[in-house]
Image (cartoon, rainbow, N blue to C red):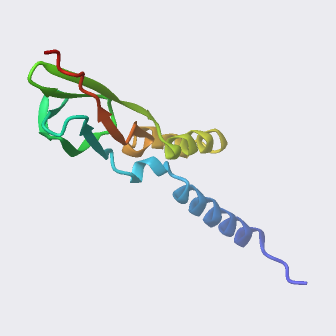
Amino acid sequence: MMRIKPRASRIVTSAITASLLVQSLGCSLFVSDMQMIEITASDPRAEIVVDNRVVGTGTAAVELSKRSSHVVMAKLGDRVGTAQVRQTISTTGILDLVGGFIILVPFLGVLGGGFNKLDPESVVVPLPQSVR
């Protein structure tokens, strides 16, 4: 039977541990902090506004930061509808938290852009019927 020297055993253990730590760094650190959101107004002529910025008419695909919630508005004349895109913790963020309790390194993922997600990914903004 071959016997491993104590020094070699420590080197192998250290290499495996270092490899696992590098692989388990907060996965959220490697994910973009931007997310594409599809916005559709119930009336295709309505102007779409996100966070007080006009982004299109009828339908718009907008890349938004996952670091905060966003207000979406559709307006046509005096008819206005609103919706909200909320910031929530992503699946990757949850995995970082769970991994952080096992080994502390994944807690770094809390700082990454992938820790959060926006919900919903597709928004329909209803406009009220016009009163005539």
- Furthest residue toward top: 131
- Furthest residue toward front: 132
- Left or right placement of residue 104 versus residue 113 in this view: right
Where does the N terminus fall, quadrant-wise?
bottom right
- Left or right placement of residue 60 versus residue 34 in this view: left
Which residue corresponds to the image point at 85% horizontal and 78% vertical from the top-left?
3
Q: Nearer the viewer, residue 24 or 10?
A: 24
Which residue corresponds to the image point at 39% horizontal and 52% vertical from the top-left?
31
87 above or below 132? below
- Furthest residue toward bottom: 1
Where does the C terminus fall, quadrant-wise?
top left
The percent coordinates of residue 14 (x first, y second) are: 64, 62
Q: Nearer the viewer, residue 68 or 14?
A: 68
The percent coordinates of residue 46 (x first, y second) are: 14, 34
Residue 45: image quadrant is top left
Residue 127: image quadrant is top left
The percent coordinates of residue 50 (x first, y second) are: 20, 32
- Left or right placement of residue 3 versus residue 50 in this view: right
Q: How many marks?
A: 0
Which residue corresponds to the image point at 26% horizontal and 24% vertical from the top-left?
82
- Left or right placement of residue 107 versus residue 7 in this view: left
The percent coordinates of residue 24 (x first, y second) are: 55, 54
16 above or below 132? below
Which residue corresponds to the image point at 33% horizontal and 37% vertical from the top-left?
123
- Furthest residue toward right: 1
